[in-house]
Image (cartoon, rainbow, N blue to C red):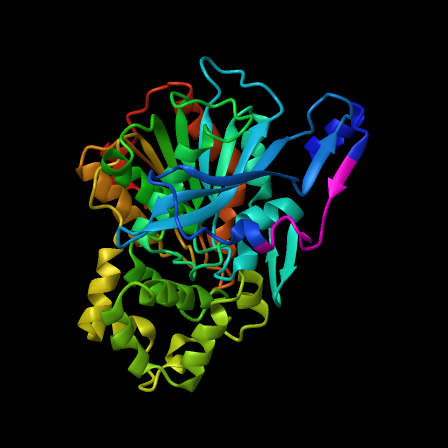
Amino acid sequence: MRRTMAWAAAGVLTLSLLATSPATATTGSFYDPPADLPAANGELVRAEPMQLAASVSFGGSIAPLPGAATRIMYRTTDMNGAPAAASGVYIEPTVRWRGDGERPLVAFAAGTQGQGDACAPSKTLESGLVVESGAVAVGYEIPSIYGLLARGIAVVVTDYIGLGTTDRDHSYVVRLDSGHAVLDAARAADDVPGASVTASSPIGLFGYSQGGGAVASAAELAATYAPELPIKGTFAGAPPADLAAVLRSADGTSLTGVIGWALNGLAQYDAEFAAAVTPELNEKGVSTLEALKAACIGDAIITSGTAFNKTSSWTTSGESLSQLAARLPAVRDSLAEQRIGTMLPNAPVQILTGTKDDIVAHPQAKQLASDWCAQGVAVTYVPVIQPVGSGGTGLNHLAPMITRAALSQQWLVDRLEGDRTSGNCSSLRWLP
């Protein structure tokens, strides 16, 4: 708000604050992938100019703030190694980069949006609030993205696989899908018409919650999947690195629905997982998982009936889904395959976690830091001390994202400017 007021004082002529679903630009053909995708990962399928929800324009030939947006679709690779289309947004900032060298790029991975196509970050970036097919999505990541643009950093935001594109369900926290989508968005950025970034522009990865897991996955996949990308650092906030632990911590909270999204995402790829889980679900469980496929985060909290209810109400045995996972080998093994922390990131990482995060378990985030430290990664582990819990409301989960926003971005900017860091692995054992 202060930035908007400052722009107004400077002589802004128009202000656009949309609050409705985009009429034609984000529906119909753009989000329908073609039958044949390009051969290379990160290659653009299509692109078109896009309006941003909150923007200001001085008119004439002066570009609007915070930048010029282009909706994109690009090729990536899914968990099974098959080609997949992902949509997203590239934003060319209006202000110049004040650091040394080329304008950097941040590949931004949004936090949990939902599983319906209406929830795609590219749609909420365009209109702020999307009401589509009975789902309601809100662009709560806009301030973080605009904060990077205000520093003169170009931003590419992925919609992930299946979120926006109409050919499949969103795979949510599937590790390979998430990491590939982030890295291929970064690959696609320099081919966007009007982009000032190049193949040699320094790259940072930034994400919180679902996005934290996505960039954490991307960080450790980069060396083998996209070794040509000049990644300088990764900020991973509240990363769900161990899904088995998150199944326990999120159950019975305001965001119990995230467990359903995780199950739906895994089931579409893993037939053994689906075959093990399906017979354990009662009628309520089956209908809840089906309804969640079209739901956004607001729906999961307000209208889905999952908020503050336990997943034990979804099963025939009365066991929670985390208990089922412990009992059923196919489920346990599938969750283990999603574990992040087994490979080596090729650049420094900051991990941010609230010590009483009531959605994404704190101990598993610290374990990720420990796993990477043991491999020699320069990890900066930042625990935000939270004296009391927030009762499953999600407040302790969201608070570090908000209170540490400027500091988190500055850490990544320092990496993009070439400043070295040794991290704080040596003191990890004494930190909460």
| Quadrant in which the N terminus is drawn | top right
Where's residue 13, x and y in %?
81, 29
Res 336 quadrant in image: bottom left
Res 173 quadrant in image: bottom left
Residue at x 68%, y 25% (from the top left corner): 63
Residue 382 can be seen in this image: no
Residue 403 left/right relative to 79: right
Where's residue 378, x and y in %?
27, 30
- Above or below, comparing residue 275 to residue 295 in the picture: below
Residue at x 60%, y 45% (from the top left corner): 125
Where's residue 430, x and y in %?
26, 41
Residue 293 left/right relative to 317: right
Residue extent of the magenta highlight: 15-28
Characterize the magenta stretch by its predominant secondary structure. Answer: loop
Residue 339 can be seen in this image: yes
Residue at x 46%, y 13% (from the top left corner): 100
